[in-house]
Amino acid sequence: MKNSKLIPLVIATALLTSSCENMSSGENAAVFGGLAGAVTGGTLALAGVDPAITIPVAAGAAIVAGGAAYIISKQQANARQRQIALQNAREAEARLLAEQKALASSRKASSSQTAKKASKEMPRFLAVDTEKSSESPAGAKPVMLYDTQSQRLVGNDVYNLKTRPATGSVKKFDTMTAKYVGS
């Protein structure tokens, strides 16, 4: 019964956030931080948790969600951004494959084992640089995701990062984890 009270809140949240890709980083942080805090606090309050616990936990959820939304904002890619990201992804994938081949030959492994190992070492998703657009926030580092299995860009989202990740680092984008390879 208590969970049925959350259904209208979930529906309202979905409707309100359905066009958030065009919002600035600060606006995204405010919306998602506020929603996370409200949902967390509301859920704990409905469960009968003491307000002395509910309030700090809800505030913490708001800070974490707002911070994550501020660090990574999204926008839709234009044709030029897609073209540059695809070119960068294909070049990065070729570099990674060449590095894997060189490493495999230095290990002096058999050719069948090398092929199997190389395919396992290639990450599924690569995060690659693209150019800024007029919609990019000031100081943003725009990246797009590339799927090494389908050899296509993942969707049409440009992720505007506040800071450029270290090359080779692994970062989470929505539900995907990608290796940042730069350009």
Image (cartoon, grey):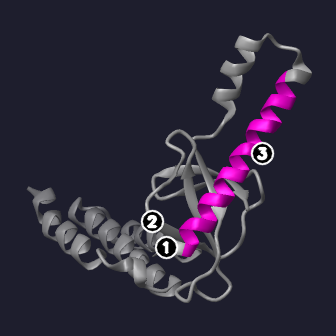
Most extreme residue toward the right is 106
Residue holding disc 2: 156
Residue 73 visible, this orientation: no
What is the span of residues highlighted in magenta in the rendered image? 80-104
Quarter of image, res 56: bottom left
The type of residue carrying mark 2 is: Asn
Which residue occupies 37% across, 68% down? 54
The type of residue carrying mark 1 is: Ala
Residue holding disc 1: 77
| Mark seen at residue 95 | 3
40 lies left or right of 117? left
| Mark seen at residue 19 | none
In primary-sequence order, the first of circles 1 and 2 is 1
Label 3 element class: helix
Which residue occupies 30% across, 62% down? 49
Q: Is residue 179 magenta?
A: no
Query: Mark 3 and mark 2 in contact (Cβ < 8 Å)?
Result: no
The type of residue carrying mark 3 is: Arg
Query: Mark 2 and mark 1 in contact (Cβ < 8 Å)?
Result: yes
In primary-sequence order, the first of circles 2 and 3 is 3
Tell me the quarter of the image containing the C terminus: bottom right
Instruction: Note whether 71 is above or below 177 in the view shown.
Output: below
